[in-house]
Amino acid sequence: MTDCEKYIASGILEAYVRDETTAEQNVEVRLMADMFSDIRNRLDKIFDEIENDALAHTTEPDPIVGPFVIATADYIGRLNKGEPFVIAPELSPSSTIAEYREFFERDDMVAPDDFENIFAKIISAIPDQLMTALVYLKKMAPQETHHDEFERFLILEGTCTITIEAENHYLEPGSYLQIPLHKKHHVVVTSLIPCKILLQRVKVAA
């Protein structure tokens, strides 16, 4: 085994890439890489392997999170500016659109024309208990599963299909649906206009 091979086999290059070497060792590694192409190539390969591994394990950001972070900030701002604190009643199979008109037929509850796929406005919220939001959906909402809260839908405008596991539910204005716990589900809009949904998340008592 050559001196270069012994140096490569020592593990110091991996330690250097992980930033686990001392200042003196850092200088040594850089000098050795400048002097010996085998060491320089091995160092480049280690960097490439780490980058490729990171890319392979990168997950796409949840497209639902962003709109709801913005909606939460908007809701807090509205309350701080003096908007009265109200609680929308819980959705149920007997709920009607008319019962909720006062909550969503407001000028500040209208989605902008240029929103990408999901736009949300929180109507009311009790932390760790109940959240009611108005959601505009242009195309779809990706698959998710809830283990500690029921998700309820009341369709206000447009149509969509909500698939729970392998079962499709075709919803139109006035339709109500509750997603069972621990069940995978996703939403696909089937109308030419955005699907306007009254969404409610109800925390399960511990």
Image: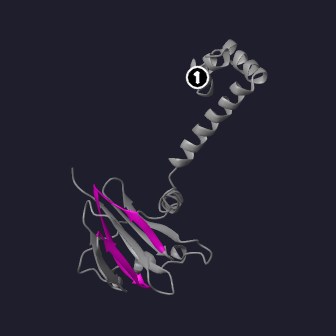
Work out whether 27 lies above or below 117.
above
Q: Residue at x 38, y 60 (%)?
A: 125
Magenta region, residue range: 140-165
Question: Is 155 one of the magenta-colored residues?
Answer: yes
In the rendering, at what x and y percent does residue 105 appear? 46, 80
Neighbor class of circle 1 (other Cα within 10 Å; few <14, some 14-19, many 20+) is some
Asked whether, in this view, residue 134 is left or right of residue 56, the answer is left
In the rendering, at what x and y percent does residue 181 appear? 25, 61
> How is the model colour-coded?
one colour
Q: Which residue is mark 1?
A: 15
Inspect the image, locate mark 1, and give the three-letter code of the amino acid beneath it: Ala
**Residue 92: quarter of image:** bottom left
Q: Residue at x 68, y 34 (%)?
A: 44
Q: Front-most of 39 and 121?
A: 39
Work out whether 17 lies above or below 91.
above
Residue at the far left: name it.
Answer: 206
